[in-house]
Amino acid sequence: MMVGAPFAQHSFIASAGTTNVRMEPVLIEYTENAVGREFTIAVKIVDVANLYGFDMKFRWNTTFLEYVNHSVCVPRDTFLDGVLWNPTLPLADEVDTTERTYWISYASMAPAPSFNGTGTVFTMTFKVIYHPVQPEPDANITLELYSTDLAAKGGNPISHTREHGTVILHQIVLSVPALPVLKVMPIKTEKLPTNSSFNIDIWILGVNQSYDIANLSITLNFNSTLIRAMSITEGPWPKSYAEDSIQLLRQINNVNGTVTYAIGLVSRKPEPPTTGILFTVTFQVIYESLIYPPPSSELTLDPTDIIDRTLGPIPHTSENGTYTANRPPPVAKFTPSTGYFLRGQTIIFNASESYHPLGIKLYTWDFGDGNKTTVTIPIITHVYKAAATVTVVLNVTDYGNFWSTTSAMLYIIESQTVPQISVVNSLTENNNFTFYTNTTSVGSRFNATVLVYDVANLYGYQVRLEYNSTLLNATRAWLPTWDPKWVFYGKSPTGLPPSFGTNYVKIGDMIMGAYPTFSGAGIVSIIEFEIIYAPTTGKASSNLDINNADTLLLDPSANEISSAKTNGHYQYIYVQPEAQPTDTVPYVVAGTVTITIIVAVAIYIIKIRKPR
């Protein structure tokens, strides 16, 4: 079973509607060196009606941009320019700086009204980490909303258009230095976790057109206790400068911490480029620091030689770089990560999974109701005195005094009735399955409907119904996907296939995608039984038993929702013709009698309201 999968793909690149998902500002331009500058974009939903949930995926270019931070503007009750109304269910808020993607998915839940109008979904801040240098072309970067799904109340998709953002970094025109320069780029590399990889480019700048370079030999030095060289790749400049290049030496020495690259250039081209990448070294991080400041390594170019075909050695300068090891902050984690709880209930908050190699020194809790506390142990309890939606924030501090935070949204509700799961007769609306007959009815069939009552925040379920296999045989089990009284009607379920044992049948389902959860009463499954034994005197009986550990209800975090379980009771009673009741319903007519779910649906229509 899966929790938190994305919305079904119903978005449209173009639509006749007016709803629009767009980025503001739509264009950001820099004509001068912007390295180190930060900017913020906002993603908005414009002119929407009946919005009840959304699922968006966004990506950027990590060659030029670095993610700094982001803010989610949900719900509108808290953020004046936000979207959706409380209560809301956060399904995804995941930044992946390696894959350079962001996934955000939220849904409103009953009794929240649908959202209408225009609002901001999130803002994100970036820093420019590289600016193209002539002769490199301008960097035309798309901030891409590559997947957007909007859902109306009831789960129907909302058609819309979407507009990406653009960042243009216009090339920097370099002044030609008096001497050629060998340069390490980027100048500074830092904050990379263990086992991650990164590239260092060795550039040549300001090569005078009068030179005819025949050979280059360059050694890059590094601290091999911090990083390990993995590979060397020739850059584009040698082949753009000469008709061909010949590899003379490509050597990695991770003991001494050196990378040496030497090439020969054959037949200089007319008016070759003065600037370009000679070669690229890929490194792997092998060390993370537990102290601050973490150790650094100079990335130095020494020795270096540039040989002209006729002039001999060409004087030049070198510009080195630095690598600084990462000092990771502690990992902050706690349970519960979300969920519904009763006002006055004692909730156990457990941060035992928070971690750092130095250990966690302090746990600072903000329970979202005005109560804050700092403790030295990971487990604490708290009681909420009022019903509300609260955000619990945990800040953990390690013994090096580094800290990090994490948060969870909890829903504190008033006391309510206990959720129930019940097996009912599809015709009589009760738990009694009694059949009177004066002839054998072997082969007759009837349906049992499994219902839930008073459930809140239902995301998935499983039913295991056990029975006396000498009397009955379960022939079919299904989910009434066509029926508006089915708990997941209008959503995108997994449709888990039923399994049949010698004396049981098991069937279940779970929402796929960021659809609102179900609350209230509804049908979860229907099971058809065949009578395989009919006594000619007396009676035979069997429980239709769901009171077992495999019958369960699940919330969005795959936690079991506590519930009361009511079994059905099957009886087959043989009576003499003169004693057969005339006013008993239901009854089994001799021959083949099948009780259908369509009749059950008609009867239940006034009792089960449409799921939200």
Image (tube, grey):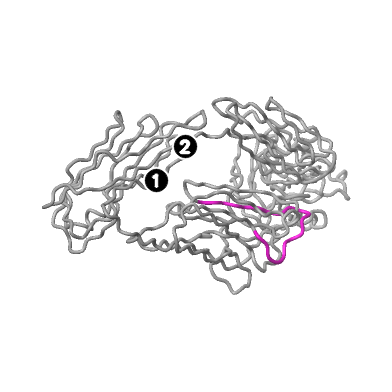
- Depth check, front residue: 132 or 433: 132
Query: Which of the 4 image quadrants contains residue 257?
Result: top left
- Depth check, front residue: 460 or 503: 460
Q: Is residue 247 left or right of residue 409?
A: left
Vertical relation: 327 (above or below) 159:
above
Query: The disc labelled 1 sits on which kind of residue?
Result: Ile
- Looking at the image, the residue that sits furthest to the bottom is 16
Between discs 1 and 2, the one toward the N terminus: 1
Task: Give the Cα separation between the discs numbered 1 and 2.
Answer: 19 Å
- Depth check, front residue: 200 or 116: 200
Q: Quadrant of the C terminus?
A: bottom right
> Considering the numbered disc 2 on the image, is that residue within a helix, a strand or a loop?
loop
Vertical relation: 32 (above or below) 497:
below
Give the x, y percent position of residue 470.
67, 34
Instruction: Say whether residue 571 is visible.
Output: no
Q: Is residue 105 magenta?
A: yes
Give the x, y percent position of residue 319.
33, 45
For label 1, the residue is 187
Instruction: Report the magenta residues as a range.
Output: 101-120
Majority secondary structure of magenta residues: strand
Task: Using the image, tell me which numbered label, if any, was put on residue 315.
Answer: none
For label 2, the residue is 193
Q: Is residue 578 left or right of residue 229?
A: right
Q: Quadrant of the N terminus?
A: top right
Query: The disc labelled 2 sits on which kind of residue?
Result: Pro
